[in-house]
Amino acid sequence: MPLIGPHPASFVKRLGLVLTWIFSDLDESEVDLFRRQVIPALNKIAEHAVLCRLDLCSLKIPLDEVIKSQNPIVFGHLREIVIRCHIPNERSLEIFESLCRGSPSLTCLELDWASIRQGPNFVVRLMERIPKVCPNLREIQLKYLNYAIEEESYESIQQVFDDPNFTFPLLQRFHCDRSMNCSGFLERHPGIERLECFNSSKSGFTGVLPNLRLFRGSVTDYLALFSKNPPPVEYLRVYLKDPFAAEEEMYFINALSKSRTLRRLALDEYRITGISLGLLTKACPNLTHFIFKLDPELSAEPKLVYSTILHNLANLEHLDLTFKCASKHQPDHYTSHLQGFSGHHSLNSVHVWSGRKDFYFVKENGEMILVP
């Protein structure tokens, strides 16, 4: 019977092909059958669908085995490509290149090397091709580069980052973590609006990112990049590993005080003391969102916590805090928290984790109430 109406493949907009778990449970004949069926299915999708996102994940099988086709598959309309596969040979590089070149509208590329080990030669060759085959990228995510190669090979990857040809004129979002110094790369990309940077920056960055609105990364990266020329960040999420040196903490608070645009602040993996809480909130008086954890001593003083926050953050709308469960005096009844912030007029929601219980409060008819 002839097909009436649109081909079923035409409804596919996002496609994820995950082979890792499948191959572990199948024998060789079933694996071969699966591989033979993948290519016709992909060709049907390429022919009939306007596919916007393609996600290929295979931690053990190289890309040229995932897409085992003699002729390139051209999707034409891809805007996002995510690859979590080995790219260990020339054929895999050619497939990567054809996927990118076949979609002029491609604006987002994510390469994830978590749990993948391969030689630095093909990692370098892959990265060198990105500007040529993806010239219109607005977002690049390079994850776990240090997992892919040995430490002695970092220099060859760093040379790619430092190469002026590794430039993307339209770039707005960039994610890079672990071991690569991205300072030079950032100086060539002043249009970046969102930056995620983990242990990837060294001191000496003298550039300016005038459009940066969101930064997520380690406090070391934040200080290295922005202590001299703070950008107009509105949302800052930083990771502060304990123990946090007092001197570095003061550098961080001083850097925060220079930011006039900060509205959202999230501190991860760091427990705030009473002194730190007062200095942090005074440095960021215009916060509307604040997420943080308390140290054991301050956890036993909820009245001090709430009075400090409410006094210094008059515009706060959303509060998310974690009490360290280390004292029998720690409040675990919702009224102990509600009394602390009930008089704050701008608050719209509060989330409290007390070590044993989660409490959610929202404003209703001008009053803060507990969400059941």
Image: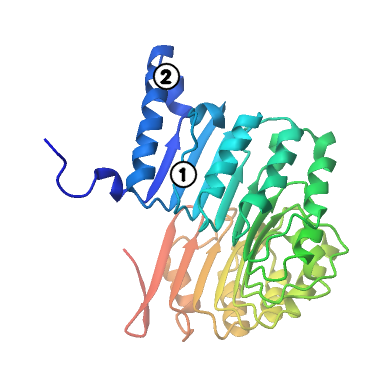
Say which of 309 and 55 sits in front: 55
Q: Position of residue 154 (x, y in %)?
A: 81, 40
Say which of 231 and 264 sits in front: 231
- Residue under label 1: 74
Residue 87 visible within the image:
yes
Q: Nearer the viewer, mark 2 or mark 1?
A: 1
- Residue under label 2: 31
Q: Using the numbered discs, state the Cα–Cα distance from disc 2 to disc 1 in whole angstroms.
A: 24 Å
For the view shown, which residue lies furthest in the front direction? 71
Q: Residue at x 46, y 60 (%)?
A: 332
Q: Residue at x 38, y 73 (%)?
A: 362
Disc 2, SS: helix
* Picture layout, residue 161 above or below residue 232: above
Disc 1, SS: loop
Q: Position of residue 98 (x, y in %)?
A: 55, 42
Give amino acid for label 2.
Answer: Val
For the view shown, which residue lies furthest in the right direction? 204
Binning the other alpha carbons within 10 Å of mark 1 as few (below 14), some (14 to 19) or many (20 upward) gives: some
Q: Residue 300's quadrant in the figure? A: bottom right
Give amino acid for label 1.
Answer: Val
Q: Position of residue 284 (x, y in %)?
A: 67, 79
* Picture layout, residue 193 above or below residue 13: below
Binning the other alpha carbons within 10 Å of mark 2 as few (below 14), some (14 to 19) or many (20 upward) gives: some
Q: Residue at x 70, y 65 (%)?
A: 273
Question: Position of 200 compared to 213: left or right?
Answer: right
Q: Earlier in the sequence, mark 2 or mark 1?
A: 2
Q: Position of residue 185 (x, y in %)?
A: 77, 59
> How many numbered marks, from 0 up?
2
* Picture layout, residue 42 above or below residue 81: above
